[in-house]
């Protein structure tokens, strides 16, 4: 591990240790926070009991659906848009202003349209993620060297095969950045939406525990979200590094 | 004629406040089946435009380009292979997959693809790099990958746009030998665009000397080399005479292209 990595680990260990000490000595009251060791213990207990398994599965499934939908729709839309400059000029300012919109403000509308099931949560996750995918895919597609497109023409590839075999593979590192953002935004969208629009899922259970001063459930569930997101992020980072290593000029 | 151009002109239309650019022509050219023709000319004279028109990548503004009896227009006909000046290797594919790219898309069966790719890897000196990615190769090696990718398809007309520009002099001479060997083996017609007068003289049956923009053929010089030849022709007396003759014709045009009209007079 690098020196920076060791220092990073040390900072986290000191912060966790300090929190443990402050909670154990009563400086931080138990109604405010519980010690990290109790969070881990609580998380293991929750996972073993299976009490929240259905909620965890629901959230992870909804996040996966939101990411998949955002990736498929975002890449397809970006590919079409990139080939239609006139239409793109209409959309570009809208994309620039998109993240200024507070997406959760639309939750009543989403419930009216999509009902009380999982769809409003998935929709918010999708809506937060899809534009990040589109913008990153467009960024990559814009950078395809003209000589590669000429090569595609020399091999007599049609528009669809050129997109699938040349444009999108070239744009893959940029699309991957969009994918990483889609993962983060989908988690934010789905769990955030569960706080306000759902009666199940990790977000709902955290909100429920919070309203009932049940720190022995709330903190372990927050820890679970952190563990899942960090694990996914680290895997994606590793994957991205391997992808970029192939392309880096030696 | 295998390929013929009649009064071919290419004008890039005016846009965004820029005037129209008359890049090429009118050009008349006929290439016999199996001929090796090289084009030399000053920078920006329209050599690459000529190649794009012949490849079907650009449509002539006037005139006609015919390949094997059929007019070329707007799309690349079957049987034409092009090697570009820029690095056109696909960075996400290994050397092996880059070379096999066109074969896969032509629907060739697997055993045939691997046989052709293995052969190409050997003759291009890339055997040890089959699993490497272009980013791990030098510029010259990447260009060899692009040449191999074109040649494995056995095109009947090969258009080369300064393919050896990224190579050192020794490698250029050796690659020239390889190109001559492949040309003899395949019987393909070759049009080579190059800046290097010596390279054009060494490789070609005929060398077309182009004027400054708009590019036109000022003269076509027949080298008179036998079909069985290699880079050792550079040591012959006639090589120097031919190179000198082409440079004499080209010098004034190159000065014109550089904007030294006064000196050219």
Image (cartoon, coloured by chain):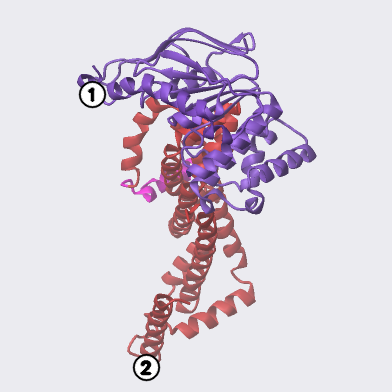
Chain colours: A red, B purple
Q: Disc 2 is attached to a residue of which chain?
A: A
Tag 1 subunit: B
Q: Is residue A160 left or right of residue A212?
A: right
**At which x and y percent is residue A34?**
43, 83
* Residue at the far front in the pictured view: B237
Q: Nearer the viewer, residue B48 or B240?
A: B240
Residue at mark 1: B260
Q: Callout 2 environment at 10 Å: few (<14), some (14 to 19), or many (20+)?
A: few
The verdict on residue A219 being magenta is: no
User: What residue did someone put label 2 on?
Assistant: A25
- For label 2, the SS is loop
The residue closer to the viewer here, A168 or B239, is B239
| Residue A244 position within the rendered picture, expressed as x and y whole percent measured from the top left | 50, 55
Please check the rendered image and state whether residue A109 is part of the magenta-colored stretch, yes or no. yes
Residue that appears at 47% across and 73% down: A218
* Majority secondary structure in the magenta region: helix
CA separation, marks 2 and 1?
Answer: 87 Å
């Amino acid at each position: 591990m690098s020196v920076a990595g060791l220092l990073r680990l040390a900072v986290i260990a000191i912060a966790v240790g300090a929190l443990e000490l402050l909670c154990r000595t009563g400086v931080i009251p138990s109604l405010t926070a519980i010690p990290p060791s109790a969070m881990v213990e609580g998380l293991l207990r929750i996972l073993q009991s299976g009490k929240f398994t259905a909620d965890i599965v629901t959230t992870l499934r909804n996040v996966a659906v939101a990411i998949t939908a955002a990736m498929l729709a975002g890449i397809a839309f970006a590919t079409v848009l990139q080939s239609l400059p006139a239409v793109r000029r209409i959309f570009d300012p809208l994309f620039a202003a998109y993240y200024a919109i507070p997406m959760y403000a639309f939750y009543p509308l989403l419930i009216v349209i999509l009902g009380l099931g999982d769809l409003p949560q998935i929709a918010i996750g999708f809506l937060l993620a899809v534009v990040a995918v589109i913008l990153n895919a467009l960024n990559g597609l814009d950078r395809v060297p003209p000589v590669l497109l000429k090569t595609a023409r020399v091999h007599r590839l049609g528009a669809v095969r050129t997109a699938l075999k040349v444009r999108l593979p070239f744009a893959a590192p940029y699309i991957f950045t969009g994918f990483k953002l889609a993962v983060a935004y989908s988690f934010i969208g789905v769990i955030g939406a569960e706080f306000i629009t759902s009666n199940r899922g990790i977000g709902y259970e955290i909100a429920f525990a919070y309203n009932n001063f049940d720190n022995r459930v709330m903190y372990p569930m927050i820890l679970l979200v952190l563990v899942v997101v960090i694990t996914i992020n680290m895997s994606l980072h590793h994957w991205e590094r391997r992808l970029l290593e192939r392309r880096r000029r030696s | 004629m295998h390929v013929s151009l009649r009064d071919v002109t290419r004008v890039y239309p005016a846009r965004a406040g820029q005037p129209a650019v008359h890049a090429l022509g009118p050009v008349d050219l006929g290439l016999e089946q199996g001929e090796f023709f090289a084009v030399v000319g000053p920078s920006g004279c329209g050599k690459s435009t000529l190649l794009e028109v012949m490849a079907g990548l650009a449509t002539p503004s006037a005139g006609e380009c015919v390949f094997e009896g059929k007019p070329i227009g707007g799309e690349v006909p079957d049987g034409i292979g092009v090697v570009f000046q820029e690095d056109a290797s696909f960075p996400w594919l290994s050397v092996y997959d880059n070379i096999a790219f066109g074969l896969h898309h032509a629907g060739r069966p697997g055993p045939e693809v691997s046989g052709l790719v293995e052969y190409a890897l050997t003759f291009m000196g890339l055997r040890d790099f089959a699993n490497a990615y272009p980013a791990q190769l030098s510029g010259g090696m990447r260009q060899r990958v692009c040449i191999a990718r074109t040649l494995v398809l056995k095109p009947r007309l090969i258009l080369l746009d300064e393919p050896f520009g990224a190579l050192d002099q020794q490698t250029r001479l050796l690659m020239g030998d390889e190109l001559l060997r492949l040309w003899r083996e395949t019987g393909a017609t070759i049009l080579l665009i190059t800046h290097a007068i010596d390279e054009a003289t060494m490789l070609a049956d005929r060398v077309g000397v182009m004027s400054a923009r708009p590019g036109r053929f000022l003269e076509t010089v027949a080298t008179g080399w036998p079909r069985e030849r290699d880079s050792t022709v550079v040591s012959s007396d006639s090589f120097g005479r031919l190179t000198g003759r082409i440079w004499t014709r080209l010098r004034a045009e190159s000065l014109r292209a550089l904007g030294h009209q006064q000196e050219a007079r």
